Image (cartoon, rainbow, N blue to C red):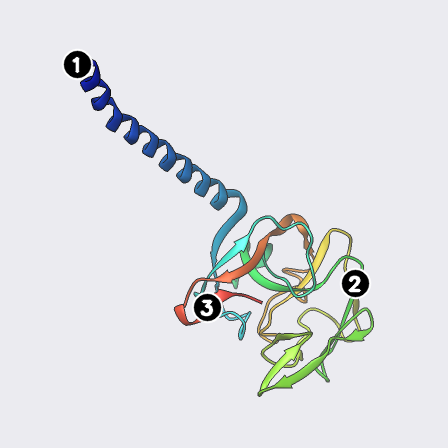
Amino acid sequence: MESTIAAKKAKKPLLEVYDWSESFLAAIIAVLVVLTFVVRGTTVDGDSMIPTLHNRQFLVMSRIYSTPRHNDIVVIFAHNMVADDGRSYGKPIIKRVVGLPGDTISIDSEAGIVYRNGEALPLEFRDGILYEDGHIINDYTSRRFDMQPGTELTVPDNHIFVMGDNRNNSVDSRDNSVGMVERNYVIGKVFFRLTPADKFGLVV
């Protein structure tokens, strides 16, 4: 009888260790699933999203992203980028959604105004900062890149038109190397900034 009780007491710590290990393994698997299929980290490369985002900032994006909306910040895979030596390559880039399927986009580069469906995206200064359609941009949009003067582009089905917030220093849908972005090339939506510490928080 005493040996049976002693054996049970000996097994109890082992069962506790087993239960703890099982819970820990389940937590690890859950984290891996989330990191693989739900969220992912990404790093800003370059200055095309200044003043909203800066080079080397570390961000978190959601990979569950089915319905793009105007002004979303997205990570896309630009597969037709061209290097200085003329070589084509692909890379992830971060931009803001300006046009959705069916939207028409045009730019008055003299006035620095972007038009969507014939209506100017509202511009205003608040505390010395320039806002367009409710979000910060670096300057009036004076560069067209490959868009010709007077061009009005219509966004095809299953595509989006993107631009960087650093409007005159951003390779985006105005440039033929990016163009209209197929939804298949949208990796995810940026929603949170981890670094630097003083900028920690939601991204809009």
Q: Judging from the image, what secondary structure is the residue with disc 3 in?
A: loop
Asked if 77 appears above or below 71 in the picture, the reply is: above
Q: Say the numbered circle drawn on residue 3.
A: 1
At numbered mark 1, what does the secondary structure look like: helix, strand or loop? helix
Residue type for callout 2: Asp
Q: Nearer the viewer, residue 15 or 28?
A: 15
Q: Quadrant of the N terminus?
A: top left
The amino acid beneath tag 1 is Ser
* The C terminus lies in quadrant: bottom right
**Residue that carries the numbered disc 2 in the rendered image:** 103
From what the image shows, is residue 51 above or below residue 183? below
Q: Amino acid at mark 3?
A: Asn
Disc 3 to disc 2, C-alpha distance: 30 Å
Label located before the other in sequence (3 or 2): 3
Residue mark closest to the camera, 3 vs 1: 1
Contact (CB < 8 A) between labels 3 and 1?
no
Mark pair 2, 1: CA separation? 80 Å
Asked if labels 2 and 3 touch by Cβ distance under 8 angstroms, the answer is no
Rendering quarter of residue 95: bottom right
Q: Residue furthest right?
A: 118
Q: Which residue is mark 3?
A: 55
x and y, in percent, of residue 145 in the image: 66, 71
Residue 94 locus on image (x, y percent):
56, 62
- Front residue of this view, candidates 164 and 119: 119
Residue 116 in the figure: left or right of residue 181: right
